[in-house]
Image: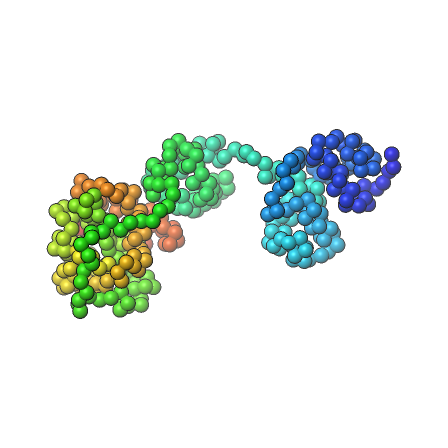
């Protein structure tokens, strides 16, 4: 058996040696096949941290191949810049940097055979899912889901409240997977997620088909609304709409403050005619402080036919969005989507009392929002100095 210095053998020989090992050859058989001594092959094997890779199916081109890692190691040994290496092997330089840091040896060198084996070990499936073995985390997440927090809110909250528990820093997709697989509640996603559905679909308006309100000279278009309303730098600018119940026979007024996302719900016990809606809005806004009564943006529905009376009684300036343009009231549309978990379409909304609607408001307003840097609407309202707001809202109606 010829004897050669292990580190002076061509890379093609080493590559062939490890290919044979991964095919199930023993160390002595692989060494004999490529023409090196057993001790030479053993040294390669030890430097690679043993070899457990058994690639029966070619790996996807999106991953680094063994040849890619050999090119990287050769380039690093010769002092070639990482960007140049990345260009040569057809990968981004960020990916190359991550690969070196992730699969390099503890003392800082990059050995292709070791790196390839480490990548395989980290990629192996199945892995034990975090919710399968961490009961405490599963319980904490279940409590937040019960309070109708979204997976995104839960993920950020875990990082913020448990900075030292790295294992609890689960991403949004991990939380969704835990729900879909029944690892948290052991039930289906329709019950666990606050949206009440596993897949997104286009939201219908649920609006009366009587036709939009006729244009009049007293209507203010959203295009004449002051620019500072759009910037959300000032409080007191609201968006409103109706949530309609089954057979168009019941409705709830939804009001959302644009800056803080603070939500109010008003019960309409009899009908949702223009007079009833106007009375509810006047009663609600008359009890709010003047700094929170600046503008209200609505769509062109018949329920706002008495908007001049509302403006005169409350001091609000009411603006109307363009027909069939819900995105112009995006804050309210998003909130209505959240509220549909509490008030599913096709149900009778008259069965909800105002106290129950207030409880829904409290739950929604205590929920952290990404757009508020994970502050809650209640907290954002208090930061503006409206600490009396919660007490007033309980007595608005």
**Residue 327, can we see it?**
yes
Residue drawn at the location 15% of the way across and 54% of the way down? 277
Q: Position of residue 244 (x, y in %)?
A: 22, 48
Q: In screen coordinates, is 305 left or right of 10?
A: left
Q: Is residue 390 left or right of residue 159?
A: left
For the view shown, which residue lies furthest in the right direction?
2
The answer, for residue 162, to whether it is visible in the render is no
Q: Nearer the viewer, residue 180 or 100?
A: 180
Residue 341 occupies which quadrant of the picture?
top left
Q: Who's the residue at 83% across and 35% down the image?
A: 37
Q: Position of residue 190 (x, y in %)?
A: 35, 38
Name the foreground residue: 51 vs 360. Answer: 51
Relative to 352, is 165 on the left or the right? Answer: right
Residue 138 in the image: above or below residue 371 = above
Count of numbered circles on the image:
0
Residue depicted at 34% across the width and 43% down the height? 195
Residue 141 in picture, x, y percent from top left: 40, 38
Q: Is residue 330 above or below residue 267?
A: below
| Residue 40 image-quadrant placement | top right
Please provide percent x and percent y for residue 220.
Answer: 22, 66
Question: What residue is at 29 percent from the left and 49 percent from the top?
Answer: 204
Q: Is residue 377 above or below residue 23?
A: below
């Amino acid at each position: 058996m010829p004897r050669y210095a292990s580190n002076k053998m061509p890379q093609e020989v080493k590559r062939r040696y490890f290919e044979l090992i991964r095919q199930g050859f023993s160390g002595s058989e692989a060494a004999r096949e490529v023409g090196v001594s057993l001790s030479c092959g053993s040294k390669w094997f030890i430097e690679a941290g043993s070899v457990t890779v058994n690639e029966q199916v070619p790996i996807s081109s999106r991953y680094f191949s063994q040849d890619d890692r050999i090119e990287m190691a050769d380039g690093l040994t010769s002092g070639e810049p990482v960007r140049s290496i990345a260009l040569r092997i057809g990968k981004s330089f960020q990916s190359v940097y991550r690969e070196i840091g992730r699969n390099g040896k503890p003392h800082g060198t990059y050995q292709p055979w070791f790196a390839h084996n480490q990548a395989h070990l980290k990629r192996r499936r199945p892995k034990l899912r975090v919710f399968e073995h961490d009961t405490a985390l599963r319980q904490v997440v279940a409590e937040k889901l019960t309070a109708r927090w979204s997976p995104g809110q839960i993920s950020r909250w875990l990082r913020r409240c448990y900075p030292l528990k790295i294992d609890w820093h689960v991403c949004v997709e991990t939380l969704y997977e835990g729900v879909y697989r029944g690892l948290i509640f052991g039930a289906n996603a329709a019950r666990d997620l606050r949206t009440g559905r596993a897949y997104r679909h286009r939201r219908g308006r649920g609006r009366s088909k009587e036709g939009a309100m006729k244009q009049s000279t007293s209507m203010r278009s959203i295009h004449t609304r002051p620019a500072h309303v759009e910037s959300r730098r000032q409080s007191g600018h609201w968006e409103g709409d109706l949530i309609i119940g089954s057979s168009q026979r019941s409705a709830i007024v939804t009001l959302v403050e644009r800056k803080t996302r603070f939500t109010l719900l008003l019960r309409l016990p009899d009908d949702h005619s223009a007079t009833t809606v106007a009375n509810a809005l006047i009663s609600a806004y008359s009890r709010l402080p003047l700094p929170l009564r600046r503008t209200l943006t609505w769509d062109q529905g018949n329920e706002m036919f008495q908007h001049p009376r509302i403006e005169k009684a409350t001091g609000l300036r009411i603006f109307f969005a363009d027909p069939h343009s819900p995105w112009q009231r995006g804050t309210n549309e998003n909130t209505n989507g959240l509220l549909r978990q509490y008030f599913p379409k096709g149900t009778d909304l008259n069965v909800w009392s105002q106290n129950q609607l207030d409880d829904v408001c409290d739950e929604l307003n205590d929920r952290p929002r990404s757009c508020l840097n994970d502050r809650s609407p209640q907290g954002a309202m208090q930061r503006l100095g409206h600490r009396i707001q919660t007490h007033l809202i309980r007595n608005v109606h």
